[in-house]
Amino acid sequence: MNDTPPKRLPGIDLEKKRVKFDYIKGNYFRIIHVDGVHGGIGPRGSIFMSVWNERWPIPKQTSHEISDEGTVGKEIESERVVRDAVVREVEIGLIIDIETAKQIRDWLTDKIDKIESATKK
């Protein structure tokens, strides 16, 4: 094992006063569609938020006829069991410190401004 410190720190250029970041997707990376948010201030002063997507419910249960050939046939819709509500599927909970929250706010404001400016043309 080599214990000699590197001559240069990876990604850091002190002469140009720059640092590079590589973005690598984690094993559980996925795209999440967000329709809403719920949360508040956490016990340690951070912000906690859960995001969800909304959709019509899928059936809890369906019944189907069995054909003369023994295959699954037409659904018997009168026997369908469904949830009596719009579904809010909570996708993920986020814990965000105040500085990160400000960065997200500023980033969102910038994107909103750009979209509104582009759609006015």
Image (cartoon, rainbow, N blue to C red):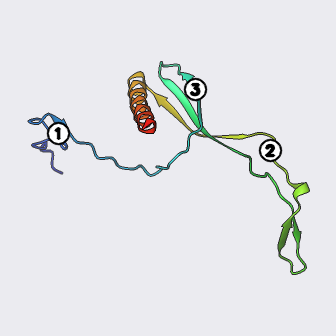
Q: Which amino acid, mark 1?
A: Ile
| Distance between the alpha carbons at the discs numbered 1 and 3 | 37 Å
Which residue occupies 22% across, 42% down?
A: 20
Q: Could you say which disc has been placed on residue 12 in the image? A: 1
Q: Which percent across, then down, holds residue 96?
A: 45, 28
Look at mark 2 in the image and give the residue it sits on.
83
Badge 1 element = strand
Number of numbered discs:
3
| Distance between the alpha carbons at the discs numbered 3 and 2 | 25 Å
Badge 3 element = strand
Q: Which amino acid, mark 3?
A: Gly
Among the two numbered marks 3 and 2 on one chain, the one whose residue lies closer to the N terminus: 3
Q: Is residue 58 left or right of residue 106?
A: right
Look at mark 3 in the image and give the residue it sits on.
39
Quarter of image, res 89? top right
Q: Which percent across, then down, holds residue 26?
A: 42, 49
| Distance between the alpha carbons at the discs numbered 2 and 1 | 55 Å
Q: Residues within 10 Å of mark 2 (few under 14, many from 20)?
A: few
Quarter of image, res 83? top right
Q: Which percent across, then down, holds residue 16?
A: 11, 36
Among the two numbered marks 2 and 1 on one chain, the one whose residue lies closer to the N terminus: 1
Badge 2 element = loop
Residue 24 sits above or below residue 34 on the image: below
Q: Which percent across, then down, holds residue 37?
A: 58, 31
Which label lies toward us, 2 or 1?
2
